[in-house]
Each structure stands twice: as structure tokens, then as C-alpha cells.
Image (spheres, rainbow, N blue to C red):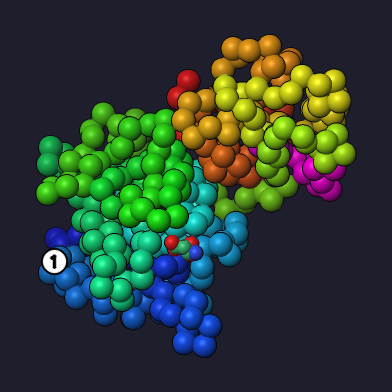
Amino acid sequence: MEQTSRPRILIVYTGGTIGMIEDPATHTLRPFNFNHLIDNVPKVKMLDYDIDHIQFNPPIDSSNINPTHWQQIASAIGKEYDRYDGFVVLHGTDTMAYTASALSFMLENLRKPVIITGSQLPIGEVRTDGEENLITALQIAAATDPVNGEPMVQEVAILFENYLWRGNRSTKMSADNFNAFKSNNYPSLAKIGLSIQFNHDALWRVNQRLPLRVHKGMSTDVIVVYTYPGMTETSLRQQLATPGAKGVVLKTYGAGNATTDEWFNRAISEAVERGMVIVNVTQCVNGGVKRKYFTGDCLARAGVISGHDLTTEAALTKLMFLFGMGCTPKQVANRMLHPIVGEMSI
Ligand code: ASP
């Protein structure tokens, strides 16, 4: 690539509604190629950036995302890291928060922006939110700190409509609203209005300048277990006996509570004794696990680890990452207690 002072941005197009068109036979939306997408955003040319792209072939609905796709995205960013100032990942909204969380762990020592965006309406629709999201994501990926010239954003973040959120704190909150994402336990990184106003205190910064390390191993030996009134011992035991499962995200009530029925605690303690790492996260969208009630205390005494205010997406992908690195259950349990890249508040 020719040397220029213009921002150099790489778009990684994975699919999602943003680039979809209607299939005339089924009248359902299907992902389409990058040229269709970019042809619908002529304003991109008004940004004086050098933009290249790579795309998933074929682009996918993000409901089909799995860790292999995360490896592809992380590898692409790792390969092109030195050639670009920032990266924009175009992705479906359904699993965007999982991908953002996964990438935040996989891209160790990241010091450049990886901005993930998509849209609720396809880019070809008159009222699309895709055009604005794409343009703003590109601007954020190109933004530098006027004081030191360094990238303004040095982490994986989700840009959607009026906000920029930390990726591993985000959750998809709405299947309809243009403001579809939120990080319920962490402030926004930027507010998008007439201008882009960064929340400097919230932005991630690392002290050490170490080279980027891309971790590709993501273990799929992790499950999510949702507690609910009426759950049976058979159902719980079957889930905990999932062949190969090493880690569990246990989604509990309120501040980390679950039934104190003896069968429940026995099944959980036995799983912990077998070496399973069980992490307690709340089903609530806001707040986290606190050892406040007897019901939650029983879980802690059974060896369940507090996930504090982790989102399910971050808890799941953090477990996948730690087991994928080859950590022992004891090491995983220990590392789950501490934040790696700002995913939880302690
Ligand atoms: N099903 C779509 C996807 O996640 C939804 C979207 O992009 O908004 O790919």
C-alpha cells in the first residue's frame, strides 16, 4: 500500500442485516456481497480515508457465527494490524455482543480501534440505520487523540446509532430499536450526536506497549445453564453432564441467587468437585452477583465463582478463551475472578 497520511481503515464484512437484500422467492432477508453494501453508501467517498475490505465468503447471518468465524476475524486483524490505523467489522446484530466479547480476549495488547457495527434495517432501505452506523464507525476507527496522535479508541467496541460501547460489556437490548445495544454496567465510550463526544475516562488504556498477540484457541467445552422456577433435577444434571463440558455460565436470579433445594446444591457441588468451573452471572440486565442473600451464599459455598457484573456474553467467551489457552480448571477459576480487558468491575 502506498504511504499516505490519510487514515487507513480495513473493513471486515462478515454479513448481517446491514448488507442483506430480500430473497424474492421467500421474501426473507439474506446476506449479500460487499459491493452491494458499499454502493449504497456513496458518502463513504466523502471521507478522505484509504479503505480496504475483506469479506466472509459467503457473508453470513450472525446467528450462524461460531468460534471458527471469530478466529477468522482475529487472524485477519492480526495479519493486517501494522498496515491499518483502525478496523471496522460489519456484523449482524444478533450475536454482535458475543463476537465483540470474544475478540476483546483474543486480541491481546490491542492498541488500535476495532469497531463493530451493523444495522437493524438493510442498507438498501430508505430509512436504513446502516449508512449512518457505517460512516460513524469509520470516523471512530480513524479518530486520533489530538494531544498525542494515538488512536482514540484502543479496544474492541460496538458502535450503534447514538453510542459507542465497550464490546465485552455490551448486550443486544432490542430487536426493533435503532439504539439496539447497551452496556448496562459500564458507561458509554462515546456519545454520537452532532459530534462524536468521547468519554475519555471510560476508554481502555494499557500501560505497557506490547506487540499484539492473537489467541485463536477458543474452547467450545463451555455451556450456559439458565435457572428458572420449576427446573428439575434431571434437567440440571443432564446439562451438567454434557460430554466434555468444562465450564458453565450459571444464569441465576437477581444478585446471584438460586434455589436452596438440596438437589440443586448437591448437583452443583458434585459438578464443582468433578472439576467443572461454574461462574455465577445474573439474569438481570443491570447489576451483578453479590453475596447478599443466603440463597446466593449457598452457591458460593458450593464452589461457584462469582461473575460479578459480567455479561453472559463476556462470561461465556472468557471461559472459552481461558480453556482455549489450555489453562487448568484451577487457573481458569482464578482468572475468572480478575478482569482481563475491562470486562468487569471489581
Ligand atoms: N439476523 C441478523 C444477523 O444477526 C440480524 C441483524 O443483523 O440485525 O445477522
- Which of 15/85 is in front? 15
Residue name at image x 30 percent, y 45 percent? 164
- Which of 346/26 is in front? 26
Q: Is residue 233 left or right of residue 291?
A: right
Image quadrant where residue 250 sits = top right
Residue name at image x 21 percent, y 39 percent? 198
| Image x and y of residue 58, in percent | 51, 77
Query: Against 192, is 282 above or below?
Result: above
Residue name at image x 26 percent, y 80 percent? 39
- Dot 1 alpha-carbon crowd within 10 angstroms: few under 14, some 14 to 19, many 20 or more: few
| Image x and y of residue 17, in percent | 42, 68
Query: Against 294, is 181 above or below?
Result: below
Q: Please say whether residue 242 is one of the residues in the magenta stretch.
A: yes
Query: Against 308, is 213 above or below?
Result: below
Point out the image quarter for the N terminus. Answer: bottom left
Q: Which residues are magenta?
A: 238-249
Location of mark 1 (residue): 48
Q: Is residue 233 left or right of residue 247?
A: right
| Image x and y of residue 215, in percent | 55, 49
